[in-house]
């Protein structure tokens, strides 16, 4: 990576919040609470970089990706792309910026219209953004794009159901590439594919990045996928980043208890190491983002939670090592072994006036 201090960020997200209202009422809807899907996220991505965003299902990572593209309404905060504040844009200026930021979706079959052939799917975006003077020029652009993603040109006349899962994801990548974007947000780009195909698609994304100078935000729940492709990794828990570091640093020494537990679940290819490695099993489910725990949001499941501060004071994401930011009051004490993990009982979560739709979560005994 080049020196970040010398470069201008391509994407800067500051204190981003996406809250969805919970509405109730028979005749008149009234807002009785909010789901805090994204609740104060800061992240920065430099040109040519790959930022991997990981977390459990429901942690808000996909909502964050869609909010960056303004596909989800933004409650508060700022999203700056190449120096332009996106939250202030509407209409044509927003559409023009969206051409430079494209998305690859998790399920290639449901994201491609089954009634359109590949040529129609790929030219739709070109026509919308006024790229290519006529049909022949657009055909040339998409034919070259098919070459880049490794699909034959005869694919243009075929329909999505005629392709395998990996080929359909290549079509999804081609649709994003055809518009000549600078940033691609890939939301779980390989999780719907066979393991044997996943590596091919990841390698393709890396080759395209090298040849076209693309910048990626890769959203995934699979740490192994993110590790392979990312320069920087951010870990999300319940709507907020809890740790962010250069990929090698994060995998060498995760500092946040949640990252440590995620990392401990990643299989190691060496059977001896695999037999010896420590597993950190979290109790309970992810709490509801409509009724998040007080203080550190992870304290209801954290094996290192302390009586002081954890339940009352929300930790900020602060830089503990160069480029390594962590949101934990006790990260350094945990890292040097001064604090040891303990057993955790799941808390009984009761609905409140502000959260009428969230069911009781009964405590589960520890093994
Ligand atoms: Fe665990 Fe406390 Fe750190 Fe939160 S602040 S991760 S509860 S030790």
Image (cartoon, grey):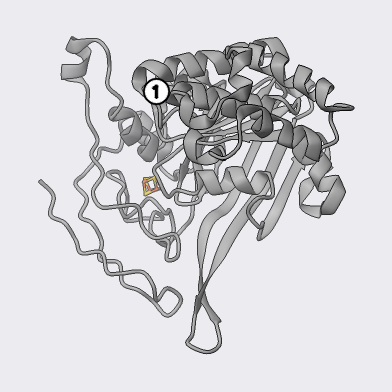
In the image, taking residue 304 as reference, residue 208 lies left or right, namely right
Residue nearest the observer in this picture, 198 or 144 = 144
Vertical side of 110 occupied by 196: above or below:
above
Identify the residue under disc 1.
224
Relative to residue 104, is residue 360 drawn left or right?
A: left
Query: How many labels, in total?
Result: 1
x 23%, y 48%: residue: 283
Q: Eyeballing the image, is 11 above or below 344?
A: above
Residue 161 vs residue 83, the one in the foreground: 161
Q: Would you identify the image quadrant in which residue 280 lies?
A: top left
| Residue found at x 29% / y 29% | 264
Q: Horizontal and vertical percent for residue 91?
A: 83, 53
Q: Position of residue 77 (x, y in %)?
A: 69, 54
Where residue 128 appears, as percent x and y from the top left, is 79, 40
Image-based side of 266 in relation to 8, left or right:
left
> Foreground: 115 or 146?
115
Q: Secondary structure at mark 1?
A: helix
Determine crowd level at label 1: few under 14, some 14-19, many 20+ residues with C-alpha closer than 10 A: few
Query: In what quadrant of the picture does the N terminus appear?
Result: top right
Residue 234 seen in this snapshot: no
Up-down: is 312 above or below 22?
Answer: above
Residue 6 is situated, as x and y percent measured from the top left of the image, at 79, 20
């Amino acid at each position: 990576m080049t020196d970040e201090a010398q470069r201008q960020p391509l994407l800067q997200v500051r204190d981003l919040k996406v809250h969805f209202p919970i509405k109730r009422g028979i005749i008149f809807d009234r807002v009785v609470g909010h789901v805090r899907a994204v609740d104060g996220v800061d992240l920065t991505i430099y040109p040519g970089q790959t930022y991997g965003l990981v977390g459990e299902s429901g942690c808000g990572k996909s909502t964050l990706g869609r909010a960056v593209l303004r596909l989800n309404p933004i409650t508060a905060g700022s999203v700056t792309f190449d120096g332009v504040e996106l939250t202030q844009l509407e209409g044509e200026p927003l559409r023009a910026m969206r051409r430079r930021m494209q998305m690859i979706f998790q399920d290639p079959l449901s994201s491609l219209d089954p009634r359109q052939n590949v040529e129609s799917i790929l030219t739709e975006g070109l026509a919308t953004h006024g790229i290519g003077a006529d049909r022949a020029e657009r055909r040339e652009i998409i034919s070259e794009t098919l070459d880049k993603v490794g699909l034959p040109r005869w694919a243009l006349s075929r329909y999505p159901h005629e392709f395998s899962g990996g080929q359909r994801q290549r079509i999804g990548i081609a649709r994003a590439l055809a518009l000549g974007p600078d940033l691609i947000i890939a939301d779980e780009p390989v999780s719907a594919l066979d393991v044997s195909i996943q590596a091919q698609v990841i390698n393709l994304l890396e080759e395209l990045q090298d040849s076209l100078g693309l910048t990626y935000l890769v959203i995934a729940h699979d740490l192994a996928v993110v590790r392979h492709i990312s320069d920087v990794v951010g870990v999300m828990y319940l709507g907020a980043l809890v740790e962010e570091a250069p990929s090698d640093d994060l995998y060498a020494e995760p500092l946040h208890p949640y990252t440590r537990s995620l990392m401990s679940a990643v299989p190691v290819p060496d059977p001896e190491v695999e037999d010896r490695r420590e597993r950190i099993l979290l109790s309970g489910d992810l709490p509801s983002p409509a009724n998040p725990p007080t203080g550190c949001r992870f304290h209801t499941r954290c094996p290192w939670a302390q009586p002081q501060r954890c339940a009352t004071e929300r930790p900020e994401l602060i830089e503990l090592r160069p480029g390594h930011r962590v949101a934990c009051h006790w990260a350094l004490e945990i890292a040097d072994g001064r604090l040891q993990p303990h057993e955790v009982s799941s808390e009984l979560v009761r609905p409140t006036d502000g959260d009428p739709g969230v069911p009781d979560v009964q405590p589960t005994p520890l093994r």
